[in-house]
Every structure is written in structure tokens, then in C-alpha cells.
Amino acid sequence: MISLEKARALKEAGLKWDPCRGDWYFYISRRQFVKYTSEADVIKSDPESDNYTFCPRLDQLLGEIQSRFKINQWWEMADDWFSIYELRNIDGAEGSVLIKSIHDSDTPEDAAADALLWLIGQQ
């Protein structure tokens, strides 16, 4: 699971959240804690309020990354790193590969969150 700081950075960068069963989120009140939504516990109030911060799972991060890719981009992931590549024609050379971004973190979720933050910043 990503940290609250990284989740906040994604929210501030514009990542939208439509709450559904199985999502993780931070709920901030007098005490800070993580809460898991269940079938009967989907957020009824405004999920974009300051009290709620979405904490995307790895599959959600990867889905969001994939939705932001251009046709000539692809990604590769290992245990704790995430790379973004782009196929370009550079100086007339066909099929030149440019490494756009490499994100190395302690967990796959953190690496993917860093990559998503980088992608959002490129748009």
C-alpha cells in the first residue's frame, strides 16, 4: 500500500476517484487511520473532500498508467522498479528507443505511483 503522502500527491495531481467496494482510502479525522470499504461501506459523502484520500491498489495504479499511455509508449515492471519507454525516430533512425522514466522504490506500488505522478506531470 502506498503512503498517505504519495496518495495525497496523486490527489493533488488530479487523480479522480469513484469509490467502489474493495477500495482503500485514508480517512482523516482527529486520528488518522486507513479504512477498507466493504459492500455496505462505500463512501456516501463527497470522496473528493479533504477528509478522504484514495489509496489506489497496484492494479488500479497500473490501469491508470495504461490509460494515459500513447500508442508508442510501453512500460516494464519488476519487483521494485518501473520503467517507461517511448519509441521515437531520432535523427532519422527508425525505431529508436528512448527511456523516458525509471522509478525505483521499496515496493511495486510505490514505483507505480511514482511513475503515474511522472506521467501526470508530463500531460
Image: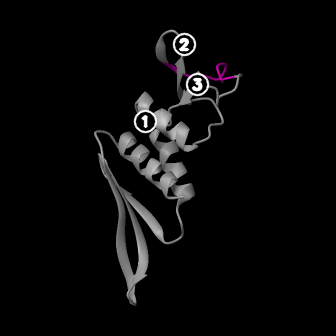
Q: CA distance from mark 2 to mark 1?
A: 18 Å
Label 1: few (<14), some (14–19) or many (≥20) C-alpha neighbours in 10 Å: some
Percent of width and height locating residue 42: 66, 24
Q: Residues within 10 Å of mark 2 (few under 14, many from 20)?
A: few
Q: Marks 3 and 1, Cα distance to the nearest angstrom?
A: 14 Å
Rendered location of residue 3, percent (x, y): 40, 30
In x, y percent, where is residue 52? 58, 25
Q: Residue furthest top?
A: 30
Q: Secondary structure at mark 1?
A: helix
Residue 41 colored in magenta in the image: yes
Q: Amino acid at mark 2?
A: Ser
Query: Decide: marks 2, 1 in contact (CB < 8 A)?
Result: no
Please report whichever mark, 3 or 2, sits nearer to the chain's N-terminal start.
2
Real-space Cα separation, disc 3 to disc 2, in angstroms: 9 Å
Position of residue 92 relative to residue 99, above or below, is below
Q: Main secondary structure of the magenta part?
A: loop
Q: Label for residue 52?
A: 3
Mark 3 crowdedness (10 Å alpha carbons): few <14, some 14-19, many ≥20:
some
The amino acid type, in three-letter code, at marker 1 is: Lys
| Position of residue 65 in the picture relative to residue 99 (left or right) | right
Query: Any mark on residue 6, and which?
Result: 1
Q: Which mark is residue 29?
A: 2
Disc 3 element: strand
Q: Which residues are magenta?
A: 34-43
In magenta stretch: residue 27: no
What secondary structure is found at the residue carrying circle 2? loop
Query: The N terminus appears in which quarter of the rendering?
Result: top left
Write the residue at 54% across / 20% down. Answer: 27
Q: Is residue 84 left or right of residue 13?
A: left
- The residue sitting at 57% across, 29% down in the picture is 22
In front here: 67 or 8?
8
